[in-house]
Amino acid sequence: MSSYLRQKYKRGRYILQKEGLFAFFLKGVRFLRRCVFIHERYYMYEVPLNEPMKFESTPKIQDFAFEIIPTSQRLKELVAQGCDFGIHIIGAEEKLNNGAIMSCVFVGKELACIHWAAATQKTMNILTEIPYKIDFSNSEAYLGWSETNPKYRRLLLSRYNYSEERKFLASIEKTIGRTRVAKSNLASLKGLPKAGGRVYGEGRYLKILWWKSWKEKLWVLGEGGTSGHEERVGI
């Protein structure tokens, strides 16, 4: 069994055991649908990593701890200490062994918020299947997906995690973070500008079975407003 299928099997088993048959069925249908067809539109953001955040990022909770996890060895140490990563432990070791950066906030020993980032093209390919265009040789980094445990939402933990992750990336000489946000993700679209993010284009991802297409439309500010130039960067 391939590493990808093994991870999906483990995730499915975890969901069935922890969340029940109904959640397993709904997420299974969503997974199968995405295997066949995906059509998503995004805004693309650039984030200066060495500039201060424009919004409050102090968590509204006392018992929390932040951790940058750069290696699988550190992950194993935290697990041995009793830290509960939940479903996010599945596949994490492989990502870390390929250079991914995992930043987490714990409440007690429970994972409350997780962010992923990449400093190289190889690592980004592990975190996403979309051929997003990033110039890693020019001190750019990829800001990947994030998730907050529903129990700990609205406590500013994700903002804090994001702020600390930016500091870490700046410390390894990355100056610009690039990310994409689905146009339907209203919470992130509202929050990123406050974090210093600036939209520089739009993207469209289309997948039909094994065929994939990614298009970017870069925004150019000119007289009379904003115009775009579309280029295909990956198929």
Image (spheres, rainbow, N blue to C red):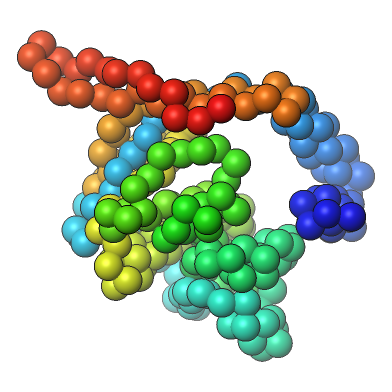
Residue 221 position in % (x across, y down): 15, 23
Residue 232 position in % (x across, y down): 44, 23
Q: Is residue 226 among the parts visible in the rendering?
A: yes
Quarter residue 160 falls in: bottom left
Is 37 left or right of 109, judged from the image as shown? right
Asked if residue 204 is positioned above or below residue 131 in the image, the reply reads: above
Residue sitting at x 28%, y 48%: 47
Quarter residue 34 falls in: top right
Asked if residue 179 is positioned above or below residue 229 in the image, the reply reads: below
Residue lying at the far left in this picture: please name it.
223
Is 141 left or right of 146, judged from the image as shown? left
What number of labels is visible? 0
Q: Is residue 109 among the parts visible in the rendering?
A: no
Residue 96 position in % (x across, y down): 59, 69
Residue sitting at x 45%, y 69%: 61
Residue sitting at x 67%, y 82%: 76
Residue sitting at x 24%, y 52%: 48
- As rendered, which of 61 and 34 lies closer to the eye? 34
User: Image quadrant for the N terminus?
Assistant: bottom right
Is 203 left or right of 194, judged from the image as shown? right
Is 73 left or right of 46, judged from the image as shown? right
Residue 46 position in % (x across, y down): 30, 43
Asked if residue 182 is positioned above or below residue 153 in the image, the reply reads: above
User: Image quadrant for the C terminus?
Assistant: top right
- As rendered, which of 155 and 70 lies closer to the eye? 70
